[in-house]
Image (tube, rainbow, N blue to C red):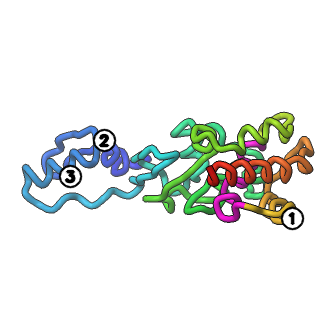
Amino acid sequence: MSNETSEASRGVCPYCSAAFDTFDDLKAHVVAVHQTDPLPKPDGLIQLTVNGQAHELMVAPEWTLYQVIHDRLGLTGVKMFCDRGACGSCTVIIGGRPILSCMTLAIECDGKTIETAEGIAEAGHPLVESYIKHHTMQCGYCTPGFITTAKALLDKNPDPTVQETMEALGGNLCRCGTYPQHPVAVRQAARILKEDQSK
């Protein structure tokens, strides 16, 4: 990390060298004390909303979204399997779409709202219980990626056919070979969501 980035992350005033805990405190200080426009946002400072929680953090230009979510925020449901965008284990939802976090630069996600498997589980989505009921996992490593991809599918298409479900999950790999059970679990979750909406 460069000295400039390190100073920005500590919130150091370029006029008087006063240090602040957050960049917002630094901007307020510049306006109040030095009577100038607030500082522009420093390079590498991004804001993310992950599972409803706001985060502001400094990232290096080469960091992937996976690194930020898994390593910096500690959300370990995002998995590293292939690191090539071929397995789906690192899938998150951004803007209603399943996104491969290992192939997405964190710096490009500034201002985005992101949903992970942890958020889906905390919200009590029926996919989680449906996946358990229908034995769609053995080792479980790929399961968060499948659930996240399936959630994006159901948000867009609340009543998918078996074929549509298989196509949507086609980018997710399972070393244990649980593929036949996934459409069953997803379609049951779709039925539960439909019943809940009709109540």
Location of residue 19 by image quarter: top left
95 shown above or below 193: below
157 shown above or below 92: below
Element class at badge 2: helix
Contact check, label 1 and label 3, Cβ < 8 Å: no
- The one nearer the camera, 106 or 178, is 178
Q: Nearer the viewer, mark 2 or mark 3?
A: 3
Give the residue number, with chain letter if any, for mark 2: 10
Residue type, mark 2 in image? Arg
Give the residue number, with chain letter if any, for mark 1: 163
Give the residue number, with chain letter if any, for mark 3: 27
Residue sitting at x 78%, y 51%: 186
Q: Is residue 149 magenta?
A: yes
Say left or right for 1 vs 23.
right
Residue type, mark 3 in image? Lys
Look at the magenta stretch and give its main secondary structure.
Answer: helix
Element class at badge 1: helix
Say left or right for 25 vs 120.
left
Query: Which residue range is magenta in the image?
Result: 142-158
- The one nearer the camera, 129 or 20, is 129
Q: Bin the neighbour count of mark 2 within 10 Å (Cα to Cα): few under 14, some 14-19, many 20 and up.
A: some
Q: Tag 1 or tag 2, which sits nearer the N-term?
A: 2
Q: Tag 3 or tag 2, which sits nearer the N-term?
A: 2
Residue sitting at x 78%, y 62%: 160
- The one nearer the camera, 123 or 77, is 123
x and y, in percent, of residue 176 in the image: 90, 41
x and y, in percent, of residue 196 in the image: 64, 48
